[in-house]
Amino acid sequence: MRSGICCAVLFVAPFTAAAQAPTPDSTSDSVQRIQSVTITATRQKETLLIAPLAVTVIGKRELENRRGYSLDEVLHAVPGVFAQSRYGTSDVRLVIRGFGARGAGDRSNAGTSRGVRVLLDGIPETEPDGRTSFDLVDLAAARRVEVVRSNASALYGNAAGGVLDIITVDPTDRQFAGASQMGGSFGLLRTVLEAGTKVGDGSLSATFTNTTQDGWRAHSNARRSLINSAYVANPAPTTTARLFLTLSNDLFHIPGPLTQVEAETTPRAANAAYAARDERRYNRVGRIGLTVDQGLTDNTSLSAMLFFNPKVLQRSERGTFRDFNRYHLGGNVVFRAESQLGDRIRGLTIVGADAAHQDGTILFYSLTPAGTRGDTLRDNKAEGATNTGLFAQQSFLVADRVNLELGARYDDIRYDYRNFITPKINAAKSFRRLTPKIGASFLTTPTHSFYANLGGGIEAPAGNETDPAGTFGQDTVFAINPLLDAIRSTTYEIGTKHLIDVSRAYLGSVSYDAALYRTEVRNEIIPYRGGRFYFTAGKVRREGVELGTAVEGVAGFNLRGSVTWSRNRYLEYVVDSVHYGVPGATANYAGNDVAGLPDKFYGVSIGHDLSLGLPLTARLDARGVGDYFVDDANTVSVPGYQTLDLTLALRPVEMGSAARLSGFVAVSNLLDRRFIGSAFTNPDIVNGVAVAYEPGTPRSLIVSVSLSRGK
């Protein structure tokens, strides 16, 4: 693993070394194009260089010629982001700078993420209690992805240790249509249909995907159908309205974890208990959302958003069949005002409010031997969560070179649990916090900036995490764990971003960004026994160095790469070992590595246009992950690994009548390496052996053919 990290550093080093020569006169088209990249995931429109945050933008080039089923496929080359596909389905483990490390484990965590806020066209996929499922996320509809790696709680509130905004809207003034068919190893079949047209003064676009796969492990088959549609209109010169409708029908089976010996000898096998209970998730989810941007004067504007998100969820889990009927609704309103404070100083004031509420019933039934719903009702309850927040931010831009941002946010997160069988345990609990932020950036040249920020964070325990430990019948005493408190964090960060014009020599550009951060965390929530219950670590420190680079058109090559080094330690953490059958004993894990977080990982994606008589592009994706522990005692570890993926793509070829043919062939895990794709944190120990490991997918082949018109 060490050699792989060194190779990545050597590969990136020439570009960072070249960055020592500033280029204030950069005028190449590629540099100007990167300079003008505008981001919106920071809740305001600002250029990438001036934002005092670590932000990565994944554009259309990086999204093309991929399977497109889950987010991990395009995040491996983003520094600070650790994304793992557990079984090749939408069940993704997503971690940004340590936030979200406990997500996507066993129990109700399966298929969800924690600690990271996910937006779809600016509308939250993250629920009020901080959980995010990926049922509505498919990269076939994505036009770009913005990743905020800095702690963004002062912008978005609960569970915003990082932000992903997947943007699907691509306004068009022409008609277009396209279809692609994909097939591959382990029974993969994927169909994508898309179309768009001008409708009056607006544009309508829609994408339909249908994906089925047998899965490479036993009991890992999945299917998902998804419709993503948007209508964008300008009913007035200063008004833009966007209407979104998204529907998903998602079923995936869970093969479960294996022991280390099982993972080495029979990696395709499923966990026997998971297979016997037919553990699975069947989610039917819809969402309708409306956003409106209204210019009030030349210097003021108002934006508003409303959404309604019904959910029908079914699960087979731990010997019970569970029916969820939920609704998630919310919205926001944001006022922005620009002002001229002097000859060289401009100000931007932002004031806004967010509100979201989720509620619904959960019915627990017995599970039949065939894994279907039984006739015995075991529990009947409702879980409500409400998150309201008020935020304000003041920015000062001095001489178009210095940007200072001051802000704060107040959040109130309330849980309301009702049990209709045992109402005496009904309970409510609130988590409140004022979260400040300060950030500054300085442009030393038009293409080189430095930034620093200081911000706080809050993350309330998710709904299933507030359930008390099921030890000695405590579930009949409390509906909400009285010992868990909100996670509170403070992040210090400095960084730099640089765009380098090498057009005179190579007809291209090079850019890089580097960041150094330290995050102090209080009340870190830690899953135990695969997520059956949760403890709280008193204090955790996460610190790291991130380096990312992008190359466009240098000697015909395009590249995106990243390297991340981090150190994640428990500073204060004492565990009551009664949960291990030793009443009165304790275990002190201070100084140990935080479970589930590798200290080193890297990703590189490099493409080159070939001249072989056809318009072909070859791309090589490399990924490396260092060793890491999956238990607090640091006795159970996952070995590091490196993988290579190779893609050969046919760029669009004119077929007559404006039709264009394209496609690609991809080989994942080209060298057929055996590796552990993900692992449970603090897993079950059966007969003294950890049941933690989820083997990664072996070498697999994907073939895709696409036909489009008008694009």
Image (cartoon, helix red, strand yellow):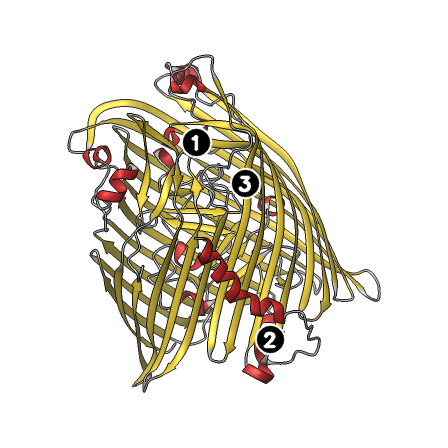
* Tag nearer the camera, 3 or 1: 3
Identify the residue position indicated by label 1 in the image: 527
Which label number is shown at residue 31?
2
For the residues bearing labels 3 and 2, Cβ distance under 8 angstroms: no
Q: Nearer the viewer, residue 449 or 148?
A: 449
* 267 displayed left or right of 297: left
* 224 displayed left or right of 442: left
Q: Is residue 652 above or below residue 590?
A: below
Q: Label 3's element?
A: strand
Which label number is shown at residue 328?
none
Q: Residues within 10 Å of mark 2 (few under 14, many from 20)?
A: many
Q: Quadrant of residue 672?
A: bottom left
Q: Residues within 10 Å of mark 1 (few under 14, many from 20)?
A: many
Which quarter of the rendered picture does the C terminus lie within?
A: bottom left
Q: Position of residue 676 (x, y in %)?
A: 34, 46
Q: Position of residue 392 (x, y in %)?
A: 68, 47
* Tag nearer the camera, 3 or 2: 3
What is the CA distance from the residue labelled 1 to the residue labelled 2?
A: 46 Å
Mark 3 vs 1, N-terminal side: 1
Residue 257 visible in this rendered orientation of the protein = no
Residue 709 visible in this rendered orientation of the protein = yes
Identify the residue position indicated by label 3 in the image: 568
Mark 1 vs 2, N-terminal side: 2
Residue, x 25% and y 39% (percent of image)?
A: 262
Mark 3 vs 2, N-terminal side: 2
Which kind of residue does numbered mark 1 sit on?
A: Pro
Q: Nearer the viewer, residue 317 or 624?
A: 624
Q: Label 1's element?
A: strand
Q: Position of residue 120 (x, y in %)?
A: 46, 54
Q: Quadrant of residue 27?
A: bottom right
Which kind of residue does numbered mark 2 sit on?
A: Val
Q: Residues within 10 Å of mark 3 (few under 14, many from 20)?
A: many
